[in-house]
Image (cartoon, rainbow, N blue to C red):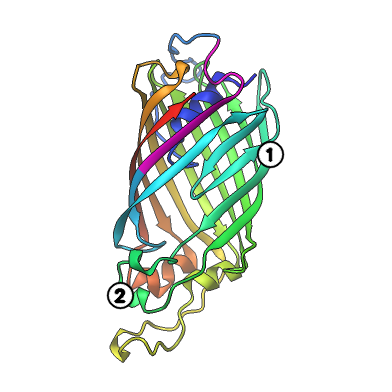
Amino acid sequence: MKTFAAGLMVAGTMLVATPLAAQDAGEPGVRAAAPDLPEQTVFDGDYLTVGVGVAYGPSYSGSDDYTAFVLPLVQGSLGGVDISPRAAGIALDFIPDAEEGPSFSFGPVVKLNRDRVKLSAINDPVVEAYGELDTAIEVGPSAGVSFPQLLNPFDSLTLSVDAAWDVAGAHDGMSVSPSITYFTPLSRGIAASLSLSSKYIDDSYADYYYSVPATNPALPAADVLPAFQAEGGFESAGVNALVAFDLNGDVTDGGLALVALGGYSRMLGDAKDSPFTSIRGKADQFLAAVGIGYTF
């Protein structure tokens, strides 16, 4: 049977894969009082959460121009297979959760990388002049371990990592994305999580998105960016805060819920030093989102 903490994580992560928020941990070694929650919930057995959100974030990785975009999402558990959202993607977990103690996850992850694909969304005429990139389809394994009941009977700490390779012939590279997330219910109708994450990219990935050619005939000489050859390394690191509010005040019975998210990340290494970021954009990246979902 899926643990209640894992079910609440579903309700609390409809907008992104690695969100956040917090509760007072109290004195060391003393567990905080937990909400009065039932033995059986909508998250026991098969369930599905469908949602849609509106986010406001950078128009490309490293941009200082912001744009709004829509996020349709699906998450749940069907036939013993857990379904988790990723940014423009999805991950599956084929390992059943343990009744007690740590639970492990493992399965495939598939993501679409559409960074700088739509020229109309770049919002920077100089970066736009360097051309539209192709959509990358990134596929690989996802694995993690979750430790429940740290400070109350329903919280958890989850460590996870995704590794993904482009199979569509866009950047032809790979990325590794580790994260650590603390989740807790704050009341019977409110759930929250706090997440730290980073992303490592190889040379092919870095070259495709962050290298700059020495010439650009589409631009006047004064606007041509300095030549730059990007190499792999850590692309970014960030933190996200998320709170989910059940509209009938009871997260255990499904139905409608609202989600609010705030996030900050910092571009690192050659992703930060690239002229696309250092001259035309900023290393500091912010994200805000709100959404609504229904669990049944």
| 42 is within the stretch colored magenta | yes
The magenta segment is 40-53
Give the residue at mark 2.
Answer: 125
Q: Are marks 2 and 1 in contact (CB under 8 Å)?
A: no
Residue 12 percent location from the top left of the image: 44, 31
Where is 91 relative to 214, above or below? above
Q: In which quarter of the image is residue 185?
A: top left
Kind of element beneath mark 2:
helix
Q: What residue type is labelled 1?
A: Phe
Q: In which quarter of the image is residue 161?
A: top right
Q: Residue 13 carries which label?
A: none
Give the CA separation, mark 2 to mark 1.
42 Å
32 and 161: which is toward the camera? 161
Residue 283 percent location from the top left of the image: 37, 61
Give the residue at mark 1.
Answer: 106
Where is 94 relative to 115, above or below? above
Q: Residue at x 57, y 47 (%)?
A: 178
Q: Which residue is drawn at 60% across and 50% down?
A: 110
> Is 179 situated left or right of 94 in this image?
left
Q: Residue at x 49, y 48 (%)?
A: 87
Residue 104 percent location from the top left of the image: 67, 32
Kind of element beneath mark 1:
strand
Along the polypeptide, which appears first: circle 2 or circle 1?
A: 1
Quarter occupied by the N terminus:
top right
Q: Residue at x 47, y 16 (%)?
A: 252
